[in-house]
Amino acid sequence: MQLAPLFPIFYQILQPSFPNCLWCGDRNSKAIALTFDDGPHPQYTPQVLAVLARYNITASFFWLGACVNRSPAIAKAVSDRGHWIGLHGYNHRSFPMLSPNDLKESLEKTQVAIYNACNLQPEQVRDVRPPNGLFIPATLKLLFQWNYRPVMWSVVPEDWVRPGVTTVVQRIMQQVKNGSLIVLHDGVCGGEDVAATIQILIPQLLQQGYEFVSVDTLWQRAKTNYPKVLLS
């Protein structure tokens, strides 16, 4: 069963319950964030980079440390082109299933992988998106304690089940609004279609006047109670 129709409902319930996470940007601004999870991938991520470069779009990538270690040159290419980098854990394991020590190790190992590939210091890579979007209050408490910034989403077209490029684009266009935080995937699940998807999606969003910004820019512009964290 596809869960795509339920994600807007999940968002409406969870966003006000956990306001210290970044769910979206400023609703008074047409700035939106295009984000990609589960990479970098040796085939799909370069395809995404090519489309983003074609339209001069800045995006944000939430990486798995194991994938960074497998494709460090791809990771460096993403970083060198000025895209924003966040953490998705070392492996794609749900955070509530990990002990605090294992969660801390997973994030720190991913930061080390990113430093080795991209020369980004750990304090520059502090945004965290939980795999599968799963977290509990205790998870967030730990992330805040360790000075990470939890990043969620407002538009989830469920591209990882490959419903088809047309369907994914339609779902996004139906849900997008000012400040939207869109989740796509450039990893093993969903990555096959992602370049074709954004090749159609980006021109449509540009035509509607949306501005693509990084997750960090959304943090800066968002009207949340979460304290600003300065990242160099």
Image (spheres, grey):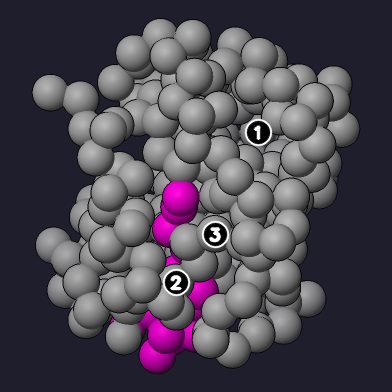
Residue 146 inside the magenta-drawn segment: yes
Amino acid on which the number 2 mark rests in the picture = Cys
Inter-mark Cα distance, 2 to 1: 29 Å
Estimate the x, y position of residue 206 in percent, counting from the top left. Answer: 79, 30
Left or right: 62 in relation to 74: left
Residue that numbered label 1 is attached to: 74
**Res. 35 image quadrant:** top right
Q: Is residue 46 visible?
A: no
Residue that numbered label 2 is attached to: 21
Residue at (49, 19) in percent of width and height:
170
Residue that numbered label 3 is attached to: 24
The mark closer to the camera, 2 or 1, is 2
Q: Are marks 2 and 1 in contact (CB under 8 Å)?
A: no
The residue range painted magenta reads 142-154
Left or right: 125 in relation to 49: left
Residue at (27, 33) in percent of width and height:
5
Of callouts 2 and 1, the N-terminal one: 2
